[in-house]
Image: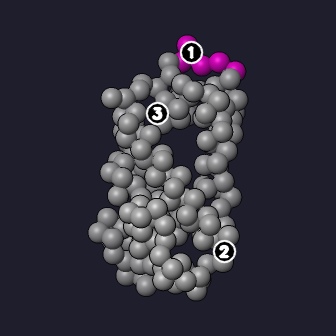
Amino acid sequence: MGLAPLPADEWDDDVRRALSVMLPEERLNPQGAGVALSTLARHPALTKAFLRFSNHLLFRSTLDPRLRELAILRIAHRRHCEYEWAHHAFIGKAEGLTDDDIAGVAQGTAVDAFDQIVLDAVDELDEQSRISDETWAALGDKLDDRQRMDLVFTVGGYGLMAMAYNTFGIAPESGH
């Protein structure tokens, strides 16, 4: 099982156009893109379409970045995705998650009551492919409809990425 990153001598304009959806010009190379995106580069059309969606989840979502990272870490843990876990633990700390918050995610527990509702929502989505009416209503105490929609798509999108990264054998990079 697994895919290697696309070799540097196979990078062409299609690959660079696909990755330009998420990366600046100076990172449109195998080293700058990193192992995950360099592996996805094997299928430029799919990568371009998927990165447009991922770009929304990571940079344009209506979710508070701290809650977004809490949800991503929970689905990464549930899907046993070491790459996503390492990458988003790093991002999560930059967005305000503490070491205790991150440790709690792995246990499915949170100190903050609303954080717990977010973790519960991730668990329900992963187990049942839906959020219960009770949890949906509890999320509505602090999130509007767009934010709740972004939460659902964030969990689904990162769950999909976890499946892909695990299948392709993408391991955490040093520094994350």
Q: Distance between the residues labelled 3 and 1?
A: 15 Å
Residue 74 position within the rendered picture, expressed as x and y whole percent measured from the top left: 40, 62
Nearest to viewer (mark 3 / mark 2): 2
Q: Which mark is residue 110?
A: none
Marks 1/2: CA distance?
A: 43 Å
Amino acid marked by disc 1: Glu
Magenta-highlighted residues: 8-13
Q: Residue at x 60, y 55 (%)?
A: 58
Q: Is residue 72 magenta?
A: no
Among the two numbered marks 3 and 2 on one chain, the one whose residue lies closer to the N terminus: 3
- Between label 1 and label 2, give the one nearer the viewer: 2
Left or right of 21 in this view: 141: left
SS class, disc 2: helix
**Relative to residue 173, is residue 60 drawn left or right?**
right
Q: Mark 2 points at which residue?
A: 145
Residue at the location (65% across, 62% down)? 61
Residue that carries the numbered disc 1 in the rendered image: 10
Q: Position of residue 125 (x, y in %)?
A: 45, 64
**Amino acid under label 3?**
Val
